[in-house]
Image (cartoon, rainbow, N blue to C red):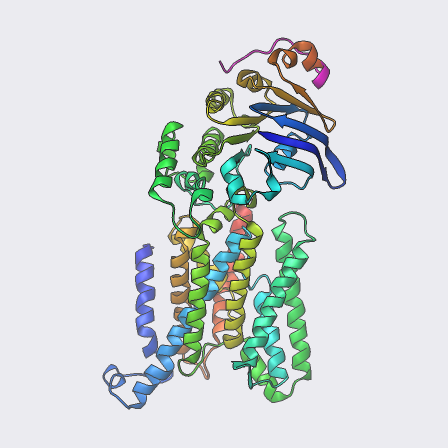
Amino acid sequence: MNKYLVWFLLFLVLLASPFIGAVDLDISKVFTQDTLQNSIFFDLRVPRVLFAFAAGSILALSGLLFQTLFRNALMTPYTLGISSGAVLGAGIAIKLGLGSLLFGIAAVSVFGFFGAMMTVLLLIYLAKFLKHSHYESLLLLGIALSLFYTSALMVIFYLGDTMQNDMLLRFTMGSLSIIGWMHPITVSIIAFILFLAIYLYRYELQLLGISDESATLRGVNTQKTTLILLIVSSFAIGTLVSISGPIGFVGLIVPHIVAKLHPTTVNNRILKTALFGGFFLVFCDTLTRGLQTQSELPIGIVTALIGGPFFIYLIISRSKKA
Amino acid sequence: MIKLDSLYVKYDNKTILKNISLDIDNHLSILGANGSGKSTLAKALCSLVEYEGSVRITGRDIKNISLKERAKLLSYIPAKLEVYDPFISVEEFVLLGRFAHKKNFLDYSDKDKKIAQNTLEFLKISHLAKHTLNSLSSGEAQLVLIAGALSAQSKIIILDEPTANLDPHNAKKIAQHIKGLKDYHQVILITHDLHLAAFIDSPTLFIKDSDATYFAEKKKFFNNSTLQELYGVEFNDLAVRYE
């Protein structure tokens, strides 16, 4: 398929997306002041599209970043257990009933952020016991952590009452349902910070994409660069996950599709990956709203349904090469 | 220019280099058996491995020189380049040689691009500019690696077994380029290829059993009895191919 056609179609979906959902919107009424349609459009649909776009960018950029830093196609914040850490943190906050604010920020976000950061620090610490750059083992560590976190979350379910469990369940399935502009703007700013950080380190990443040794020899402080970028992306993922819940596989799929469409070195793919990630999640979100079901399909389920088979395809095509 | 002082390198509790002290004022060829620590010595010079003792370049301990400054002082050319990024082109790779000269966070300057381009022209590989690194033959890859080092414009160039993966024709081509490098750079050559070492004609360091012997003159090393003693293999005169 023509790559420009793919981009164009995704762009069309983005434009159409705010008009699709449980309530059919009429263009003429949408732009009339003080109608219900006007309020649905500007207070629900448009901010949601922005939220989905920014969230998709964060997920895709983190995926590209992890794959480049660790030189492994399967590395993402999800496969490494970082987002599971955020989910567990947020889950604990929900269980403790910390709905209120903590230093002016929602407690769930603070706990989600710490969950993500703790996981990154734990991975960095555990990686010291691995033999030099055996990143495959790091992936196994991440999977082990994910399973551990999931079990811990099950314990919380077991202890929780029905209301908390319902909240938790909806949270763990991932959702882009938001009201108003607060979350979309926060997440957009974070997406921009992540993009900027990755863009500033684009040539360091290009060198790290060759090998650790090449990067060191050319003058890159690989540990410092890796740490800075990991912290910024964990901050982004932690905050996003604490708002939306986990949305898997976007970080895995999008960088690969972009690399297929634009086979060029990593620093030429940063902006493209951010945009494609945004378009892709808006597309998936439009699906959840367009499909007529009893209630809205959680976005995490849609991306996982697309991502699962893709993950298997990736593993098979990888082992074919080797 | 390079001064090693009681250098020890251990790896997994095995001593690879033992108490090596050496002044490398100019060119040097390092030879030795497999696993004798030749590459380890080269990697110690670039601080790619942990070591005890000191390595000084122009009087400064390399542990006190920033990574970028070090990259401007010396380039290391591995035997084979492992590349994860499947899309990076030759042109982009050679430009990365200018990384240490580039301002933080900014793009490469026109001067950097010009230098990278001139390096490709100098080594007569401009036609490969748009090819990806993974698509190169071993001979082309070695030239591209040399181009990367040249664009860094470092005084010292360390080559780790540059002819190990090459056929005689490409080996000759690389050998002649390396000899050319001696005019402008301090060339430290690590090799198994006795013909290459003889052709490059630098003072020789022979490493065996984690110990090093220095031969200042070509004749002292490249004679049948010395070679036989060092390698434990019978030698008839080397057939020099690279002239």
Q: Residue at x 52, y 82 (%)?
A: A104
Is residue B239 in the magenta section? yes
| View extreme (top): residue | B237
In depth, the one of A114 and B86 nearer the eye is A114
Is any part of residue B232 visible from this angle?
no
Q: Is residue B7 left or right of residue B42?
A: right
The x, y position of residue A287, in whole percent, is 40, 73
Is any part of residue A162 visible from this angle?
yes
In depth, the one of B136 and B125 nearer the eye is B125
In the rendered image, the vertical position of residue A104 relative to residue B103, given as above or below: below
Q: Quadrant of the N terminus of chain A?
A: bottom left
Report the span colored magenta.
B229-243
In depth, the one of A206 and A283 nearer the eye is A206
The x, y position of residue A177, in whole percent, is 45, 80
Assign the magenta stretch its main secondary structure: loop
Q: Residue at x 46, y 25 (%)?
A: B184
| View extreme (left): residue | A28
In the rendered image, the vertical position of residue A125 relative to residue B202, given as above or below: below
Q: Quadrant of the C terminus of chain A?
A: top right
The x, y position of residue B39, in whole percent, is 63, 32
